[in-house]
Image (tube, rainbow, N blue to C red):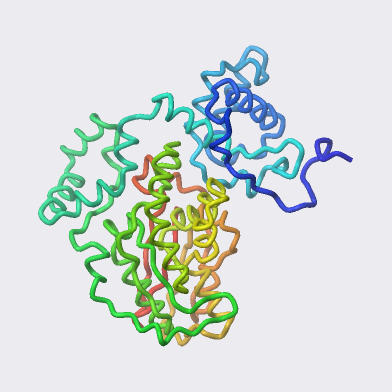
Amino acid sequence: MSSAFREGSLQAPTRHPLGQNEANFYDEISVFDELERVFDICHGCRRCVSLCNAFPTLFDLVDESSTMEVDGVARQDYWSVVDHCYLCDLCYLTKCPYVPPHDWNVDFPHLMLRAKALGFKQGRTKLRDKIITSTDRIGSFASIPIVANVVNAVNTNKQTRALLQGAIGVAADARLPTYHSQTLSKRTRRHKVDQSKAVASDKTQGKVAIFGTCYGQYNEPHLGEDLLSVFEHNNIPTMVIPNTVCCGMPKLEMGDLGSVESLKHKNMAILSNIVDDGWDIISPVPSCTLQFKQELPLIYPEDERVVRVQKAFYDPFEYLMLRHKAGLLKTEFKNSIGKVSYHVACHQRVQRIGYKTRGILSLIPDTESDTIERCSGHRAVTGITSGSAFLIRLTTGLAIFIEIA
């Protein structure tokens, strides 16, 4: 029986490359024809209604149309659906029964990305979004001594926040990240690494390089410091990678594929050499990790450097759990944490690694973790960065990193 006549598949989902270099990728008629085809399938299914607001928006447009079908929705209204997609990927991973290899070949996130890329080409992107997603430029300026104090004061002042909301639409009551003049690179530049202590396992090289991320570099430098402490506490030689740039996820979620490619070239020139020297790589932000583990390989599947980096990139707790399974993780915790509510980032879930953070928490005596799997409503364009984090510090000097979207 053809898969078109049944729901789901007994085969594992197959993710096809994005295809941004194909002749019709940016063709408006082709894009809207595919949007109509997929929207019609979604309308007949509606399993994703409980996910992001893209689906309720689509279904409301259909239900309020003259035909109560997708053909009754004005094509220009499709943009409201596209704008509500955060590219979390959960519809593809957890809900859709028609993902490839099903004949209907529904990849909603990649279709939304294609539409966003078209919108960016057409000049539909707001200046605010272009500014906010330029995380390297903002961070390097806002972390200048004295400037950092001014920026932090402005970001916490009610009057200036009201002006900011009126000027570029950043909500006056939204918490903005703090900027530090003592960036992660500055804090760790004198760190010494003894590679002779590296002990490899069957799946890890035993020495780790931290991709600090824009957020970890400028806003939460203690994330990298604590990861450094955690890994070296477990006898893993660890360093922070210097001179990297933004992973490109904020630009990707805006549809700016040109900037994504530029950032990719700059990072791969550094990261591929590190991998070739025998290092594994981690990052403290789930979205940045996903960018290297999934998004860039799907956009540039023929770039050998991208593939090499993909194979060496890990979620921090994925890596720690691999070390634990190899009998190489120190688990002599002296204190319990108690009850922990652990919010699983969407971009951590779609890495398909399971609940590794919860697994590490379960190793701590008298610690109970409550897992939350609902969307936090945080996204790259509106949230400055698409990932954030908090740390629970243990009195042993060990820190447990918990990702939230």
Can residue 344 be seen at all in this image of the molecule?
Answer: no
Which residue sits at x=27%, y=77%?
191
Depth check: 360 or 110 in front?
A: 110
- Residue furthest toward the left? 146
Can residue 106 be seen at all in this image of the molecule?
Answer: yes
175 lies above or below 76: below
224 lies above or below 45: below
Q: What x and y, as percent, mark residue 322?
A: 56, 75
193 left or right, relative to 356: left
Q: How many marks?
A: 0
The quarter holding residue 240 reads: bottom left
Position of the N terminus by quadrant? top right
The quarter holding residue 98 reads: top right
Q: What x and y, as percent, mark residue 263?
A: 38, 48
Depth check: 165 or 309 in front?
A: 309
Which residue sits at x=34%, y=66%?
241
- Residue furthest toward the top? 66
67 lies above or below 163: above
Which residue sits at x=53%, y=52%?
303
Which residue sits at x=38%, y=61%?
270
Q: What x and y, as percent, mark residue 82?
A: 51, 31
Q: What x and y, as percent, mark residue 151?
A: 17, 48
303 lies above or below 251: below
